[in-house]
Image: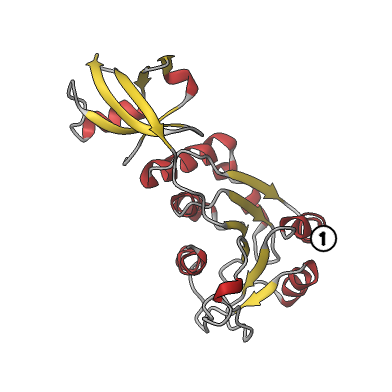
């Protein structure tokens, strides 16, 4: 936890906060609950600053807060991701949140097993917790939005075109021979201000899905011959698009 993240119910006055639960447990475990201790603190969807511990009463901590700094700028990328295996979903949500992605569309694909959509990992509270952990890691406060799309065709035909109104769409596909000009020095001056990146399941998108993305206005993005795990691919691809 690199940021103590507060929510509105934690505020007992404009400059006081009272926290309990997981955050207190973490501060106790890491020996950071001494009176007078100053912590990097932020308000969910609000500013960042400091919180000084005034009182520790066993299961609650009261802080004096001064929040007057803006959170980090969001990444200029929105993510379209074929729903990963449930056991990896939490880590992936945390990772892309840490990188500053603020809009995540989890969609269906031919290679996504139907059972994935029944996973408890897709529960609102579970996803919210993973998002908070990502924000705490990266010292950010702006909560990303996660959208669930159980049908591939309705998404790519009805939703995807709207995502590209002010954004350049890239569909990542292993072995694609079409390379985006993201790293071209000649094209660098003309780069889009925002990207929409579509990343498929570990086996990649099937041909039909690639064609539908192209019809929606996406471009194929070359990212090498290797078939990577989704976690690895996301970090590699997003790092190319971040300022």
- Height in image: 84 above or below 210? above
Determine the image quadrant of residue 43: top left
For residue 150, side relative to residue 63 (left or right): right
The quadrant in which residue 68 appears is: top left
Apparent side of residue 113 relative to residue 72 in the rendered image (left or right)? right
Residue at position x 26%, y 24% in the image: 52
**Above or below: residue 14 compared with residue 139:** above
Q: Residue furthest bottom?
A: 177
Nearer to us in this view, 184 or 174: 184
Q: Residue 24, how many percent across, how many down?
A: 30, 26
Q: Is residue 203 visible?
A: no
The residue indicated by pointer 1 is: 157
**Taking 22 as reference, is 52 left or right?**
left
Q: How many marks?
A: 1
Looking at the image, which residue is at 24% across and 17% down?
Answer: 54
User: In the displayed structure, would residue 206 be above or below residue 5?
Assistant: below
Identify the residue at horizontal 66%, vertical 76% (top origin). Answer: 220
Which quarter of the image is occupied by the N terminus?
A: top left
Q: Nearer the viewer, residue 8 or 113?
A: 8
Disc 1, SS? helix
- Whole-percent x and y of residue 238? 50, 64
Answer with the quarter of the image where residue 157 lies.
bottom right
Q: Position of residue 160 (x, y in %)?
A: 75, 58
Q: Nearer the viewer, residue 200 or 15?
A: 15
Q: Give coordinates of residue 148: x percent, y percent.
A: 67, 48
Q: Is residue 15 left or right of residue 114?
A: left
Q: Is residue 51 above or below residue 154?
A: above
């Amino acid at each position: 936890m690199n940021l103590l993240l507060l929510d509105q119910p934690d505020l007992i006055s404009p400059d006081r906060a009272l926290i309990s639960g997981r955050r207190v447990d973490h501060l106790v475990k890491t020996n950071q609950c001494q009176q007078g201790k100053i912590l990097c603190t932020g308000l969910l969807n609000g500013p960042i600053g400091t919180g000084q511990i005034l009182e520790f009463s066993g299961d609650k901590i009261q802080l004096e807060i001064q929040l007057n700094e803006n959170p980090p700028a969001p990444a200029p990328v929105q993510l379209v991701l074929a729903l990963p295996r449930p056991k990896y979903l939490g880590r992936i949500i945390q990772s892309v949140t840490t990188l500053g992605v603020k809009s995540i569309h989890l969609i269906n694909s031919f290679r996504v097993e139907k059972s994935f959509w029944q996973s408890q990992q897709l529960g609102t509270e579970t996803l919210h917790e993973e998002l908070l952990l990502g924000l705490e890691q990266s010292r950010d406060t702006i909560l990303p939005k996660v959208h669930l799309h159980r049908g591939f065709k309705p998404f790519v035909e009805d939703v995807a075109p709207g995502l590209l109104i002010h954004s350049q769409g890239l569909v990542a596909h292993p072995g694609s021979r079409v390379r985006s000009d993201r790293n071209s020095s000649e094209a660098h001056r003309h780069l889009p201000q925002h990207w929409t990146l579509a990343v498929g399941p570990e086996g990649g998108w099937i041909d039909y899905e690639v064609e539908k993305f192209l019809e929606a206005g996406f471009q194929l993005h070359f990212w090498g011959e290797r078939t990577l795990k989704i976690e690895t691919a996301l970090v590699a691809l997003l790092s190319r698009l971040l300022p």
